C-alpha cells in the first residue's frame, strides 16, 4: 500500500486508518475501495472485520440496501434454502482462512463478520468480502454487489484539482 493509498483511505474514512494490511480491492477509478485489516488493531483490540469497505459511494449505497430490509430477507432465505446456507457457510470459512493468513487472534477464533455463517448482520462486510475475493465466494455479498450496480461510474473522492 502506498502513502497515496493511505491518504485516500484516510479521506474516505474521515480518520487515520488503523491496522491496514493492504488494499484488497480497487475501484475501477484506481482508488482503494476495500482494505484488508489486521485481525488485531495496533492498540491490541481484536478486529474480526478482515475486509473493510472504504469507498464512500459503495458505503452509502450499501447503507441504503440495509435500510430497505434486505438483511432480514436474506437471513430468512438462509433458513429456508439449505444450498444457500451451505454456500454462505463456505464464505464464512473463506473469510476465516483469509484472516488466519494475516494472523491468529484466539479471542475471535471461529468468528468471521457480517453475521456469517447463520445470519446477515452487516452488508458492508459481505460486499467488502465479495469485492475483495471476486464473484462466487460469498453468495449474499455477490447479490448485494449486483444490486449496487456500477457505483464507481464517478470517482469516490475529488482529485487535487477539485474535479469529479
Image (tube, rainbow, N blue to C red):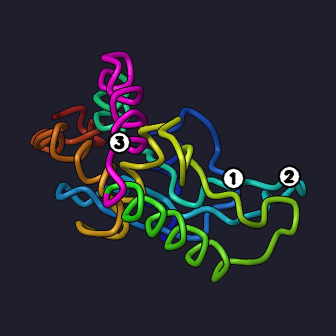
The residues colored magenta run 64-83
Q: Residues within 10 Å of mark 2 (few under 14, many from 20)?
A: few
Q: Residue 95: x percent and y percent?
A: 53, 67
Q: Residue 104: x percent and y percent?
A: 79, 76
Whether residue 95 appears in magenta in the rendering, the answer is: no
Q: Is residue 81 above or below residue 57?
A: below
Question: Which residue: 37% across, 64% down?
Answer: 87
**Mark 1 or mark 3, whichever is nearer to me:** 3
> Is the Cβ of the residue at disc 3 closer than 8 Å to that at disc 2?
no
> Is the Cβ of the residue at disc 1 closer than 8 Å to that at disc 2?
no
Question: Which residue: 62% across, 58% down?
Answer: 112
Q: Residue 75: x percent and y percent?
A: 42, 36
The residue lying toward the viewer, choosing from 25 and 83, is 83
Work out whether mark 1 precedes mark 2 in sequence or the reverse, and give the earlier one. 1
Q: Is residue 110 above or below residue 114?
A: below
**Mark 3 or mark 2, whichever is nearer to me:** 3
The residue lying toward the viewer, choosing from 137 and 153, is 137
State the separation of the CA atoms marked 3 and 2.
Answer: 36 Å
Q: Residue furthest bottom?
A: 101
State the separation of the CA atoms marked 1 and 2.
Answer: 11 Å
State the separation of the CA atoms marked 1 and 3.
Answer: 38 Å
Label 1 sits on residue: 18
Q: In the rendered view of the protein, which quadrant contains the C terminus?
A: top left
Q: Is residue 27 above or below residue 133?
A: above
Provide the secondary structure element on which disc 3 rests. helix
| Numbered badge on residue 45 | 2
Provide the secondary structure element on which disc 2 rests. loop
Whether residue 69 appears in magenta in the rendering, the answer is: yes
The residue lying toward the viewer, choosing from 64 and 17, is 64
* Tag count: 3
Q: Residues within 10 Å of mark 3 (few under 14, many from 20)?
A: few
Label 3 sits on residue: 80
Amino acid at each position: 500500500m502506498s502513502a497515496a493509498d493511505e491518504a485516500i483511505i484516510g479521506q474516505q474514512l474521515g480518520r487515520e486508518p488503523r491496522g491496514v494490511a493492504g488494499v484488497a480491492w480497487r475501484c475501477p477509478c484506481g482508488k482503494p475501495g476495500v482494505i484488508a485489516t489486521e485481525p488485531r488493531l495496533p492498540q491490541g483490540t481484536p478486529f474480526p472485520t478482515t475486509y473493510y469497505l472504504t469507498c464512500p459511494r459503495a458505503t452509502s449505497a450499501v447503507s441504503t440496501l440495509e435500510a430497505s430490509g434486505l438483511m432480514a430477507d436474506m437471513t430468512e432465505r438462509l433458513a429456508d434454502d439449505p444450498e444457500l446456507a451451505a454456500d454462505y457457510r463456505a464464505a464464512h470459512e473463506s473469510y476465516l482462512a483469509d484472516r488466519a493468513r494475516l494472523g491468529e487472534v484466539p479471542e475471535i477464533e471461529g468468528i468471521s463478520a457480517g453475521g456469517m455463517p447463520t445470519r446477515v448482520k452487516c452488508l458492508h462486510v459481505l460486499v467488502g468480502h465479495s469485492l475483495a475475493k471476486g464473484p462466487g465466494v460469498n453468495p449474499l455479498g455477490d447479490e448485494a454487489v449486483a444490486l449496487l450496480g456500477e457505483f464507481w461510474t464517478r470517482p469516490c473522492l475529488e482529485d487535487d484539482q477539485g474535479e469529479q
